[in-house]
Amino acid sequence: MATQTKRSARHTRSQSAALTAAAEASSPEERTSGGSDAVRVVGIGASAGGLEAFIELVSAIPTDTGMSFVLIQHLDPRHNSMLVDILTGAAAIPVQEVVDGMRAERDHIYVIPPDTEMTVQNDVLRLVPRTPKVPHRPLDSFFCSLAQERKSKAIGVVLSGADADGASGLQAIHDAGGITFAQTPESAKFDVMPRAAAVAADFVLPPSGIAERLVSIARGDGSKEGEQPAVVFDRILQLLRANHPVDFNHFKRASVERRILRRVLLGDYDGLSSYADSLARDSAVVETLYQDLLIGVTSFFREPARFEALKTIVFPTIVQNCSAESGVDGKRQSVISAPSGRTRMSGRCGQECPLSTYRVTSETASAARPQLVCNR
C-alpha cells in the first residue's frame, strides 16, 4: 500500500510538472487574456448546500458552449472529495479534479481538490496548500485572480453557502467588466452567500436559469455581425453624444467597446446592431450604457490609511495654525483630489486672505506618521 501511494504521488508530481512546462512553453500571444479567441472562464463557487446547486447547473450545460467551468467549494481538508464522481454522472462534458499547472480548456469542468487554494495565471490553474488563516476564502481568492487574468472575459457565479465568501471576488469581476451571477436566495439551501453576492450580481437566478443565461452568452460570443463592427460602434457613440455631454470618442476605444459588448450580452440582444437599434428607440437603455461607461476612479476613498492621516495629522495641523493674523479659517476647508495620487487640503477666510495648502503623499500616507507638506 505504501509503495502504491508513493508511486501515485510521483505520478501526480510528474503530471503537474509536465503541465507546467507545457504552459510555460506556449507563446505570449497564446497566453493573452484579452484576445477575441480567449476562452470564457466561468468560476462557480459554493459552500454549504452547494452540491444540489452544482448538479442542477452543470446538468443543464450543453457540450458546445466553448466555456471552461471551474468549481470552487468549501471542502473538508481531511477527506477526499467525491464531487468529481458525482458531477461526472450529471454533466455532458468532462469533469476532472485540478492538478497544479492544468490549462483551462473549452467545454471542460474543473473541480478544486481538498485542502488547497486555487488561482488562475496565464490561463493555467494554480494550486497552493490551504492557508491556516480564518475565515477561509477560496472563492474570493479565485474570483479576484480570474478578474485580473480574464478581465471582461471573466464570469463569476455564487451559489448556496452559509458565509459571505465570494462577495468581494464577484465585485472584482464586475469591476473588471466581467459578468456576474448569484443564485436566488429562495432556491438556495443556505442563502447567506448568494444574498451577500447579489449586490455585485448582474443576474440573480436559480441554477438552471444561470445555466440558460450562460448558454445565451456563449451563443452571443459566437454570433457574426453583418454590419461592420466599427460602423456600429460609431453609431452607438453618436447616440450617446446626442443624449449626454460626455464624448466617449476621447476615451480608450478598446475599453469602451468592451463595455458596450458587455451590455449586448447582458441584454441578450441578437447582436451589436440589434443593441444599437434598441439604443435609438429607448432612452433608458442609453442611460444604462452611459452609467456603465462612467467607471469612477475612487480607490482613494476606499483607503482608510489616507483618511486616518487626514484626521490625525492634516486637520489638527490646520486648526492649530488658525489665527486672525494667519488669515486661515479652520472652519472652512476644501479637499481636492488630484490624479497624481496627491490630495490637497486648504483653508481660507475670504477672497483677500492668503491660501494655505497641505498635501499627504501617496508614498507616506500608510506610514505610522505620514509626512505633511505645507505649500503656503
Image (cartoon, rainbow, N blue to C red):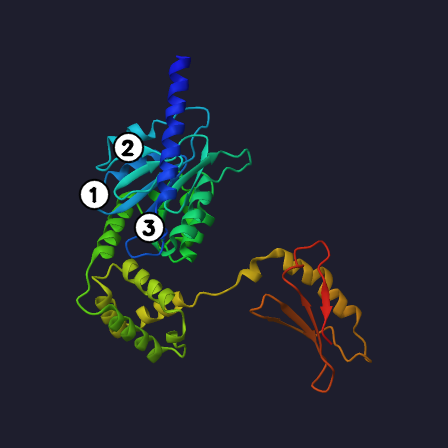
Above-or-below relation of 250 to 11: below
Q: Residue furthest top?
A: 1
Please name the residue that numbered disc 1 is placed on: 62
Categorize mark 2 by other alpha carbons within 10 Å: few (<14), some (14-19), many (20+). Answer: many
Give the number of the disc on residue 360. none
Look at the numbered discs 2 and 1 and tell me whether their residues touch, using CB distance below 8 Å: no
Give the CA distance from mark 3 to mark 1: 26 Å
Whether residue 50 is situated above or below residue 326 in the rendered picture: above
3 and 1 marks in contact (CB < 8 Å) = no
Quadrant placement of the C terminus: bottom right
The residue indicated by pointer 3 is 30
N-term mark: 3 or 1? 3
Q: CA distance from mark 2 to mark 1?
A: 14 Å
Q: Nearer the viewer, mark 3 or mark 1?
A: 3
Precedes in sequence: disc 2 or disc 1: 1
| Disc number for residue 87 | 2
**Quadrant (top left/top right/bottom left/bottom right) for the N terminus:** top left
Which dot, 2 or 3, sits closer to the camera? 3
Please state which of residues 100 and 87 is positioned toward the viewer in this rendering. Answer: 100
Q: Position of residue 141 (x, y in %)?
A: 46, 43
Q: Which SS class for mark 3? A: loop
Q: Is 284 located above or below residue 300 in the figure?
A: below
Q: Can you tell which quarter of the image residue 20 is in?
A: top left
Residue at the left extreme, as displayed: 226
Q: Nearer the viewer, residue 162 or 345?
A: 345
Give, as a three-letter code, the residue at label 3: Glu
Which sits in the foreground, 260 or 348? Answer: 260
| Amino acid type, residue under disc 2 in the picture | Leu
Amino acid marked by disc 1: Pro
Residue 304 in percent (x, y) is at: 62, 56
